[in-house]
Amino acid sequence: MNRRSVLKNLNANKKTKVEDKTNIEKLIEKLKVNSQPVTVPVIPETYSKELQCYYNVEQKIEKDGGKIHYGWNIHQLATLIEGEHHAVWENDKGELIDITPNQDRTTEILFCSDEKTTYSGVNIGNIRMNITDNKMVDDIILFYETNDLFWTYGERKDEEVVNMPTIIVKMIESFNGVIYQLEQQVKKGDNHNSLCVCGSGKIYSKCHSVLLKNDRLQYIKEAKKIKSKM
């Protein structure tokens, strides 16, 4: 399963420049890091691929020396702020450069160092925080985190492909659909107290919010069983 293509589709919502310092401070607390965010220039190499920061930096080190520098790329959507685990290149002068191109083609990123959280081939999920009063966004974050967990159950074949049991792939696709649907509802102004779109006549918090969370627990239980047999 190609994680790059899946992430491209899910990240279609335009990321905005982070300007709310209160949100940043709260996110840093959630990231549990001691460093403060800094602006890092984005200067991609010709061989660099989107969403492949770890491998891009490895190639850069082979060609030009320096070292890998781990941390979190902080960006904000309309409803949440998140830290995406990221690797940038550190040159011999200690300067940080992001050599990985991003979808929005921005020339700089907001980066928070975290040398304790290193990449070893296993997916590191984004750390997200709801910046609205809409509890439906909390559900969206929960389902994102569920898929992040499922990605850890695969075996990495190369920098782009993760071998994943078919049933877990279907679980991920199922929650991708849920996330998309909920994001569309939030855009329309729906919240936990809105009528559920299933047509039951119940509000979302008493209907599919409950059903989806029950499905989530069952899926996680099944996925863990599959993982234990791999």
Image (tube, rainbow, N blue to C red):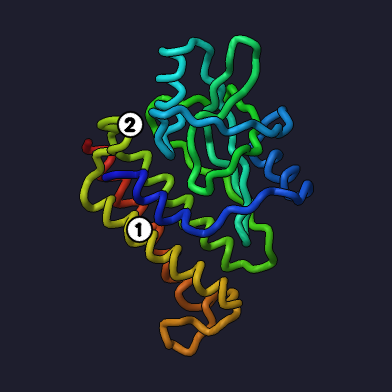
Residue at screen point 62% across, 37% down = 108
Residue 17 lies, in percent from the top left, at 67, 49
The mark closer to the camera, 1 or 2, is 2
Which residue type carries mark 2? Glu
Q: Secondary structure at mark 2?
A: loop
Marks 1 and 2: CB-CB under 8 Å?
A: no
Q: Quadrant of residue 77?
A: bottom right
Numbered disc total: 2
Frontmost residue, 20 versus 133: 20
Question: Which of disc 2 and disc 1 is earlier in sequence?
Answer: 2
- Which of the image's four quarters has the C terminus? top left
Which residue type carries mark 1? Gln
Q: Is residue 28 above or below residue 66?
A: below
Q: Is residue 194 above or below residue 146?
A: below
Residue at screen point 25% across, 31% down = 157
Given the current orientation, which residue lies at the most extreme front position? 46
- Which of the image's four quarters has the N terminus? top left
Q: Is residue 181 above or below residue 16?
A: below
Q: Which residue is mark 2?
A: 159
Residue 189 lies, in percent from the top left, at 60, 77
Residue 134 lies, in percent from the top left, at 64, 68
Residue at screen point 42% across, 20% down = 58
Residue at screen point 43% across, 87% down = 200
Residue 162 lies, in percent from the top left, at 28, 38
Q: Which mark identifies residue 218?
A: 1
